[in-house]
Amino acid sequence: MNLRRHGMLLAGLVIVLGMSLLALLAPWIVPYDPTAFDLDAVLMAPCSAHWLGTDALGRDVLSRLLYGARVSLWVGFVAVGISVIIGMFLGLLAGYFGGWIDEIIMRGVDVMLCFPSFFLILSVIAFLDSSLVNIMAVIGLTSWMGVARLVRAETLSLRERDFIAASRLAGASPARVLVIHILPNALTPVLVSATLGVAGAILVESSLSFLGLGVQPPYPSWGNMLMEGKATLEIAPWMSLYPGLAILITVLGYNLLGESLRDLLDPRLRQRIDAGRPRPFRGRIRLRA
């Protein structure tokens, strides 16, 4: 990897680890209760008492921002965990057994991909209670298709390898072949997809909360903080600025980390990228009179 890729990986790691650490330590480092009203400090600009200012109810923006990080990252991790488990299970079955099992699973993937994922999530959430558990479950249950396709493609390639044939001849059951031999070798694209999926889940949760279908006030979320700041954008821009920056930086960090991991863990892809780049001309140019 060159310096640029090393820089992307380092920047992504710093952002991801930094945000995760702040979210984990939020109960011990927040200066104020994120849900406590203070009518004497309504719409206070950033100052020494409130570093990022206060909102329309006098609540400290920094405290709400840190607790909002807990919500966003928790949704991202759990939703991606659900989608990865479902996608890996179905992808392994489709790729290893093939035939009618593969046909049924992949047609189901095609049907799911026909619907725009965000509007499908909106439709489901509209009929359910807007609880954090429901949001995580719906996002996870509607985003497994990419993982399933990746794992299926890796499984189709791996099942023809010599070590898989040797394992079958030794009497290994299909479950043992899948879990012991194929699954560990198919984890590289899953890891990259999961890293990028966390960023997507954070964006979906923030969008739902902004529309009023996600985490409900007074509990803080970056999305509902943006919604609350919309009404006072001209007189208190910090209410929308800091949640927006938090979403931008976090999603950027996970995207940088995912792209860097893809280049690091998939040498074939890196070779294809390098092969497609123009090479410098090293010959001689002769001029004719």
Image: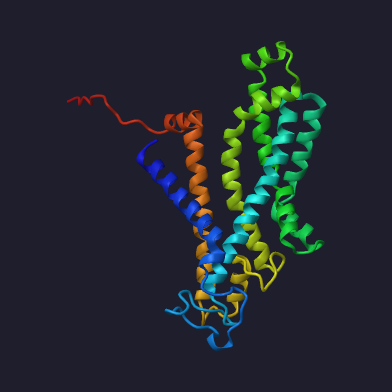
Residue most extreme to the top: 169
Residue most extreme to the front: 28
Task: Determine if residue 289 is in view.
Answer: yes
x and y percent of residue 188 in the render?
57, 34
Residue most extreme to the left: 289
Give the image's coloring scheme.
rainbow
x and y percent of residue 178 in the render?
70, 26
Tell me what residue is drawn at x 82 percent, y 27 percent: 100
Task: Determine if residue 142 is in view.
Answer: no
| Residue 55 horizontal side relative to residue 120, left or right | left
Quadrant of image for the C terminus = top left
x and y percent of residue 192 in the render?
56, 40
| Residue 230 horizontal side relative to residue 144, left or right | left
**131 above or below 267?**
below
x and y percent of residue 119 in the render?
73, 57
Quadrant of image for the N terminus = top left
Tell me what residue is drawn at x 50 percent, y 69 percent: 242
Tell me what residue is drawn at x 54 percent, y 75 percent: 32
Q: How many marks?
A: 0
Tell me what residue is drawn at x 60 percent, y 79 percent: 231
| Residue 100 horizontal side relative to residue 45, left or right | right
**168 above or below 4?**
above
